[in-house]
Image (cartoon, rainbow, N blue to C red):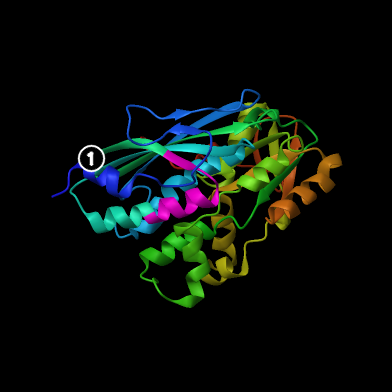
């Protein structure tokens, strides 16, 4: 049986990009990197737990991919450039085939975004993955607290598809080509890194949509001290989401489904052309879904939404 050191050396060394700013990666007590002196560092960490953040029968490649994707999405929401990652892997037992698959999924996405995996740890226990990522941002980072009265409210991509993809997976729709797009939305979300970078200096506030559009838009409203008014007719769930869930439930998924890892952001109306230019540059669809007004809370077609309607998932909630 291989030790944790063997697993690190064989499967978790040399993942991601070979960056010139990595002086020492896996193999010492700490990684050594040389960040640019004129850039702000961004640090984020997410933990994924078996049966909570992904189904127990989720493919190992997808678990590795998603473990990094959720962190990349945090850097995207700040308008940053992801650079270095640390990986903590807790395994109930040594399963080399699973670890190899996990490493392939993580490595593919890391290389796609020029991220170097520079260290981490392997321990024994319930299956849990923690990824800490560090990025940089040459311009002032996007934050949640910058929305201003009069701004427009935007969202990227196709919210709701990831939650439908999880439903399809759990319903046994593992191979049907009809629902492949929905399954991919959950198993392989697309962190909007390029869009976040393009929105720096354009958007006034941003957040990544991990707990559902309403829940995360509410964080922008709370942090900025404003009310967000959403127009129902501007919400357009995708055709495949409507085919899976039906029109009414599709809108619910659009507003409250989790795991989208899209960007929700605000921008002044005068910046609309710049927003669209940023979307084209990032090859990512965006949609204006509402406006920022004075007050507090979230509104849908003028009706206030109760706080518990958009609270999102809470690990220690009742």
Q: Is residue 107 visible?
A: yes
Please give the residue where the numbered disc 1 appears in the rendered image. 5
Furthest-right residue in this view: 270
Residue 52 at x, y = what percent?
Answer: 34, 47
- Which residue is painted at 78% across and 51% down in the image? 276
Q: Is residue 127 visible?
A: no
- Which residue is painted at 83% across and 41% down in the image? 271
> Quick check: 161 above or below 316?
below
Residue 191 at x, y = what percent?
Answer: 56, 49
Judge whether residue 280 is colored magenta.
Answer: no
Furthest-left residue in this view: 1
Q: Which residues are magenta?
A: 104-117
- In the image, is 101 to the left or to the right of 311? left
> Quick check: 262 above or below 83?
below
> Quick check: 35 above or below 199?
above
The residue closer to the viewer here, 83 or 307, is: 83
Look at the magenta stretch and give its main secondary structure: helix
Callout 1 environment at 10 Å: few (<14), some (14 to 19), or many (20+)? some
Furthest-top residue in this view: 37
- In the image, is 107 to the left or to the right of 262? left
Judge whether residue 111 is colored magenta.
Answer: yes
The residue closer to the viewer here, 173 or 31, is: 31
Residue 162 at x, y = what percent?
Answer: 50, 57
Q: Of helix, strand and loop, which one carries label 1?
A: helix
- Which residue is painted at 31% across and 55% down in the image? 100
- In the image, is 146 to the left or to the right of 315? right
The residue closer to the viewer here, 195 or 55, is: 195
The residue closer to the viewer here, 36 or 103, is: 36
């Amino acid at each position: 049986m291989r030790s944790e050191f063997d697993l690190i050396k064989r499967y978790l060394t040399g993942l991601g990009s070979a960056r010139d700013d990595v002086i020492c990666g896996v193999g010492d007590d700490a990684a050594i990197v040389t960040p640019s002196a004129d850039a702000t560092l961004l640090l984020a960490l997410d933990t994924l737990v078996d049966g909570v953040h992904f189904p127990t029968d989720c493919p190992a490649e997808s678990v590795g991919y998603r473990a990094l994707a959720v962190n990349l999405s945090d850097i995207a929401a700040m308008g940053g450039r992801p650079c270095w990652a640390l990986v903590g892997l807790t395994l109930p037992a040594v399963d080399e085939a699973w670890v190899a698959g996990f490493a392939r999924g993580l490595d593919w996405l890391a290389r796609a975004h020029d991220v170097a995996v520079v260290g981490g740890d392997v321990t024994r226990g319930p299956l849990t993955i923690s990824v800490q990522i560090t990025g940089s941002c040459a311009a002032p980072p996007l934050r949640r607290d910058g929305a201003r009265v009069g701004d427009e409210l935007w969202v990227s991509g196709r919210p709701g598809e990831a939650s439908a993809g999880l439903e399809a997976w759990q319903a046994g729709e593992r191979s049907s080509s009809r629902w492949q797009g929905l399954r991919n939305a959950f198993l392989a979300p697309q962190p909007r890194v390029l869009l976040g970078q393009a929105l720096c200096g354009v958007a006034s506030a941003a957040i990544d949509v991990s707990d559902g559009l309403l829940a995360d838009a509410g964080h922008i409203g709370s942090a900025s001290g404003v009310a967000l008014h959403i127009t129902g007719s501007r919400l357009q769930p995708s055709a495949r989401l409507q085919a899976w869930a039906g029109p009414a439930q599709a809108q619910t998924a659009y507003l409250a489904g989790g795991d989208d890892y899209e960007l929700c952001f605000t921008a002044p109306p005068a910046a609309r052309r710049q927003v669209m230019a940023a979307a084209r540059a990032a090859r990512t669809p965006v949609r204006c879904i509402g406006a920022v007004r004075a007050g507090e809370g979230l509104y849908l077609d003028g009706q206030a939404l109760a706080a518990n309607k958009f609270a999102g998932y809470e690990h220690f909630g009742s």
